[in-house]
Amino acid sequence: MDGHPLPLTGERTLPGIADERYWFLRHVIAYRAAAEAVAELTAPVVLDAGCGEGYGLELLAAAGAGRVVGVDLDAATVEHARRRYAAADERIEVLAAELREVPLEDDHVEVAVSFQVIEHLHDIPGFLAELRRVTRPGGQVLIATPNRLTFTPGSDTPVNPFHTVEFTAAELTATLEDAGFEVVRVLGAHHAGRLREVERERDASIPALLGQAPAEQWPDWLRAVVHATVEEDFRLGGDHLDASLDLLAVCREPA
């Protein structure tokens, strides 16, 4: 655990843990894309729905947000995020709430993000309706989730016991459009750099290898790859979506 105050639960990844570095940076690239959207605006209000540990709040604030509101249900997680991030930056606020009942006024935020969350929910229409309620007309909503075709290949039943549903790019697009969003584009996360080279050299899937055994049983070469992972080992693009690791949908709340 490398001394992190929050436990790994299988539902979230955490910063500062060497054996989590691959998963953590795979999550961070979605926040980098959101940070670009934030940087194009003037001090926007940003919502992180299902903020977890809170590292994304810091990234969004650093991109130029005027206010960043993180919402999560778990009390210990919320308290940690408040101590670690909100206490250090007056622009950050962390609230404990259900994602179907976000304690914000209508049309309050200009950018809403929710990363690696939707696949855990039981009331997805209710959740998306709530995101629409709090997002201003013309505002952006970014949703990231694992690609079902690579995360749970060959099955419609998620392999992760914490997931209620997983999506292909087409399914995610249809779900978001049915909720009333305008889907501007869908991007896929892919390996790049050293990760792509290692998979070619080993003729193996790194995510599959990581999931086959607990970290203490990884071979030395795999642990070394995980510990050396950097953000540049991932890329986001609109190509080969069905082969992507994760999906990132960039949506707009209709004006």
Image: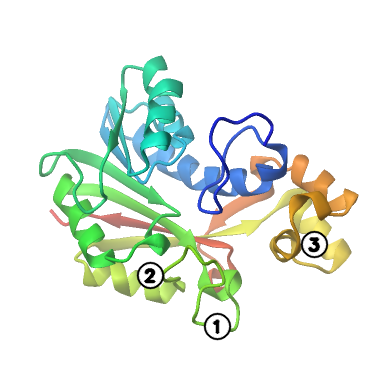
Q: Check disc 1 and report the residue beneath it.
A: 155
Are the residues flagged by discs 2 and 1 in contact, CB closer than 8 Å? Answer: no
Please name the amino acid that badge 2 sits on: Leu
Q: Check disc 3 and report the residue beneath it.
A: 199
Give me the C-alpha separation between circle 2 and circle 1. Answer: 17 Å
Q: Check disc 2 and report the residue beneath it.
A: 172
Dot 2 falls on a residue whose secondary structure is helix
Q: Residues within 10 Å of mark 2 (few under 14, many from 20)?
A: many
Given this view, does label 2 or label 1 mark the residue nearer the observer?
Answer: 1
Please name the amino acid that badge 1 sits on: Ser
Question: Picture coordinates of residue 114 (x, y %)?
Answer: 37, 50
In the orientation shown, which residue stands out farthest toward the left? 106
The tag earlier along the polypeptide, 2 or 3, is 2
Position above or below: 118 against 177 = above
Dot 1 falls on a residue whose secondary structure is loop
Give me the C-alpha separation between circle 2 and circle 3. Answer: 27 Å
Q: Is residue 136 visible?
A: no
Question: Picture coordinates of residue 81 (x, y %)?
Answer: 42, 29
The tag earlier along the polypeptide, 2 or 1, is 1
Q: Is residue 56 left or right of residue 106?
A: right
Given this view, does label 1 or label 3 mark the residue nearer the observer?
Answer: 1
Q: Residue at coordinates 17% horizontally, 40% vertically from top-left?
A: 103
Question: Picture coordinates of residue 144 (x, y %)?
Answer: 44, 56
